[in-house]
């Protein structure tokens, strides 16, 4: 007889009561980590063993310096409270560099933390319910959820409780502590918003005959080789969410490639055995799970789901303003008004499905936010948000929700007082950039700085004020591994190196026409662009677009059109685009223009230097 699936999901603290207060962290894990560091320093724990341990606890080594760490704080569903933001601010000032970094997967990272200080950061995080446990390593990473979940006009129901229940169920769960590689869940709120096609498991909410459920996509993911996820079945009822998740993890755990680090993500398994075969195996595995799963295990997940639903914002308890019930953006339609508040309203304020309620984007520079800004953000949430929490986004920004229309001017003034009032959040101006060579061992180029340079230039040129750039994105990665998600950008870049004569040059491969959502597609490689020519190339693309677009056409729509060979002007396809851009990317001789041979943020000639990556344990 098959053995039933049963485990203690609350281990290692068996006496801990089921948690209904969003407490993800355990204080005792801080002491446990400190003891492991001591054993490592005493050579009683070898480097590989310690590396696996710290990765499982969400701690990366810093670039070319093992004495410092990057701590990745999990924010399940992207939902975070003012107390947690203030604690992160304090920890950053005490143990990090006085700032934090929002990643594209709704994590918050603290960089350059002394190894001996990591346990103290863990202790502080646990005090406000946060953890970095399993934010790295070969396990289930932070569970993402659309930042519009609960407020999106097109959603059939709020997926936040489901995302949190999945995150809670698998945290510290023995079933996923030693997978072949990392594993990712992404929940959307509707077909349009979310990154469901580029995750191991992507879930789109739907309702059939009054029953809640999901369209489940499997086997997606980005990296050196990227794949779009496949639809498992037309409708997966919510009653099968847990069994489908467990079956997928068990199948991957059993069949995933544990020998070849470069090909051991689940997307490779799906590609190699074929989708139809994988689908058949998965459905059989789910039947087995449902036949053997124990009642306590099912009850545990159901308890987590109920707790998450209880903790979720209940719109019926929020007083709705009668002011400003406008449902569509832009809130202000004038493009000629140079007033900073009007400019901000135009791109950073989104109407919710709740009448009179608005969500406000806080635009960050490539995900960076200082400790003081974190505190101001916390104050804004307490003072103006009726749900008293915020979401962080895959675009490396924050979103404060449930704000009354008459409070928007006060929100802008508060944010602007600390440099958080930049416009452009819903436009191409809000450039994504991974940490790049500022901290990552695998990075080749300083993608982080380049993203900031692009954003600064676009704000200077008032590009955010033009409707044609709403909905388009630029995303930059420092290597092909796609932490900046360049392959799902309107215009994406990933870093590399090239030799020109006797000199090395930082260079980016440019991609066109990537997109997210349920119909998301991967971008197409166009050409290689020297780092110091990237901004010139983008501006030339924008100039060409303005000359050739049809009436009312947006940049992403035009780029899609030329990507499929349907251009109607001088640029009919990607080859035509390349011809226009080739003169732009030519570099002068090193002797006449040495700055072109240096990367952003570096005053010496470029050298491509990498070290052992830690994406896997």
Image (cartoon, rainbow, N blue to C red):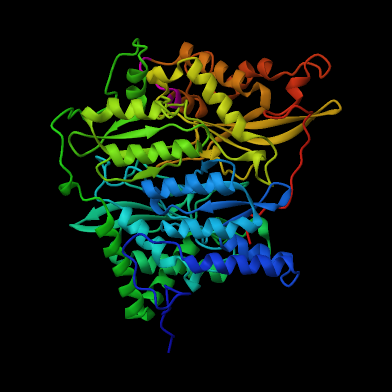
Above or below: residue 228 compared with residue 27: above
Asked if residue 577 lies in the magenta stretch, the reply is no
> The C terminus appears in which quarter of the rendering?
bottom right
Residue 587, image x and y in percent? 74, 19
Q: Is residue 80 in view?
A: no
Depth order, front residue of 555/76 = 76
Quadrant of the rendered structure where residue 462 is?
top left
Quadrant of the rendered structure where residue 524 is?
top right
Total of numbered circles in the picture?
Answer: 0
**What residue is shown at x 35% (from left), y 43% (from top)?**
390
Q: Is residue 265 left or right of residue 211?
A: right
Residue 438, image x and y in percent? 65, 39
**What residue is shown at x 49% (from left), y 39% (from top)?**
371
> The N terminus appears in which quarter of the rendering?
bottom left
Q: Is residue 268 in view?
A: yes
Above or below: residue 53 compared with residue 608: below
**What residue is shown at x 81% (from left), y 13% (from top)?**
592
Asked if residue 553 lies in the magenta stretch, the reply is yes
**In the orientation shown, which residue stands out farthest toward the bottom?**
1
Depth order, front residue of 128/1 = 128
**What residue is shown at x 29% (from left), y 23% (from top)?**
330
Residue 138, image x and y in percent? 57, 62
Q: Is residue 194 left or right of residue 227?
A: left
Bounds of the magenta segment: 551-557
Depth order, front residue of 194/356 = 356
Quadrant of the rendered structure where residue 382 is?
top left
Residue 232, image x and y in percent? 40, 58
**In the orientation shown, which residue stands out farthest toward the right?**
502
Above or below: residue 287 compared with residue 565: below
Depth order, front residue of 148/482 = 148
């Amino acid at each position: 007889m098959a053995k039933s699936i049963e485990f203690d999901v609350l281990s290692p603290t068996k006496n801990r009561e089921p948690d209904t207060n969003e407490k993800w962290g355990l204080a005792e894990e801080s002491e446990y980590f400190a003891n492991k560091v001591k054993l490592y320093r005493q050579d009683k724990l070898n480097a590989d063993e310690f590396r696996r341990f710290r990765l499982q606890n969400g701690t990366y080594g810093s670039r070319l310096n093992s004495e410092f760490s990057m701590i990745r704080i999990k924010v399940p569903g992207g939902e975070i409270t003012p107390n947690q933001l203030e604690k992160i601010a304090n920890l950053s000032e005490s143990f990090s560099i006085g700032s934090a970094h929002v990643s594209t997967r709704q994590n918050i990272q603290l960089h350059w933390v002394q190894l001996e200080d990591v346990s103290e950061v863990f202790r502080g995080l646990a005090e406000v319910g946060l953890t970095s446990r399993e934010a790295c390593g070969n396990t289930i990473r932070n569970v993402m959820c659309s930042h519009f979940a609960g407020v999106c006009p097109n959603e059939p129901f709020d997926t936040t409780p489901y995302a949190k229940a999945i995150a809670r169920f698998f945290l510290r769960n023995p079933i996923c502590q030693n997978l072949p590689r990392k594993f990712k869940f992404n929940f959307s709120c509707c077909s349009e918003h979310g990154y469901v096609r580029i995750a191991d498991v992507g879930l789109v909410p739907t309702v059939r005959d009054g029953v809640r459920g999901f369209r489940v996509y499997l086997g997606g993911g980005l990296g050196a080789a990227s794949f779009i996820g496949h639809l498992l079945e037309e409708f997966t009822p919510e009653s099968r969410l847990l069994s489908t998740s467990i079956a997928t993890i068990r199948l991957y755990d059993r069949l995933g490639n544990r020998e070849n680090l470069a090909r051991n993500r689940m997307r490779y398994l799906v590609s190699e055995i074929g989708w139809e075969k994988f689908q058949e195996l998965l459905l059989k595995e789910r039947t087995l799970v449902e036949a053997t799963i124990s009642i306590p295990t099912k009850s545990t997940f159901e308890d987590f789901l109920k707790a998450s639903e209880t903790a979720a914002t209940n719109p019926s308890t929020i007083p709705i303003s009668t002011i400003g019930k406008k449902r569509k953006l832009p809130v202000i339609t004038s493009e000629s008004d140079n007033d900073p508040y009007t400019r901000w309203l135009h791109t950073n304020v989104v109407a919710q499905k709740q009448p009179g309620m608005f969500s406000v984007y806080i635009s960050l520079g490539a995900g960076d936010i200082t400790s003081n800004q974190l505190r101001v953000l916390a104050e804004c949430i307490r003072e103006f948000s009726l749900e008293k929490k915020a979401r962080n986004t895959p675009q490396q920004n924050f979103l404060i929700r449930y704000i009354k229309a008459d409070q928007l001017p006060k929100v802008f003034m508060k944010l602007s007082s600390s440099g958080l009032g930049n416009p452009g959040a819903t436009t191409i101006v809000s450039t994504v950039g991974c940490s790049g060579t500022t901290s990552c061992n695998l990075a080749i180029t300083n993608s982080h700085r380049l993203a900031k340079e692009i954003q600064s230039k676009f704000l200077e040129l008032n590009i955010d004020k033009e409707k044609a750039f709403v909905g388009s994105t630029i995303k930059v990665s420092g290597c092909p591994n796609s932490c900046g998600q360049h392959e799902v950008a309107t215009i994406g870049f990933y870093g590399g190196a090239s030799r020109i004569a006797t000199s090395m040059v930082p260079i980016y491969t440019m991609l066109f026409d990537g997109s997210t959502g349920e119909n998301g597609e991967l971008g197409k490689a166009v050409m290689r662009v020297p780092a110091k020519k990237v901004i010139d190339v983008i501006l030339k693309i924008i100039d060409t677009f303005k000359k050739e677009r049809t009436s009312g056409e947006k940049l992403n729509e035009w780029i899609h059109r030329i990507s499929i060979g349907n251009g109607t002007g001088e640029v009919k396809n990607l080859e035509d685009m390349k011809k226009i851009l080739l003169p732009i990317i030519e570099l002068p001789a090193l002797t006449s223009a040495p700055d072109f041979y240096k990367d952003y943020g570096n005053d010496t000639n470029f050298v491509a230097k990498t070290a052992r990556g830690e994406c896997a344990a």
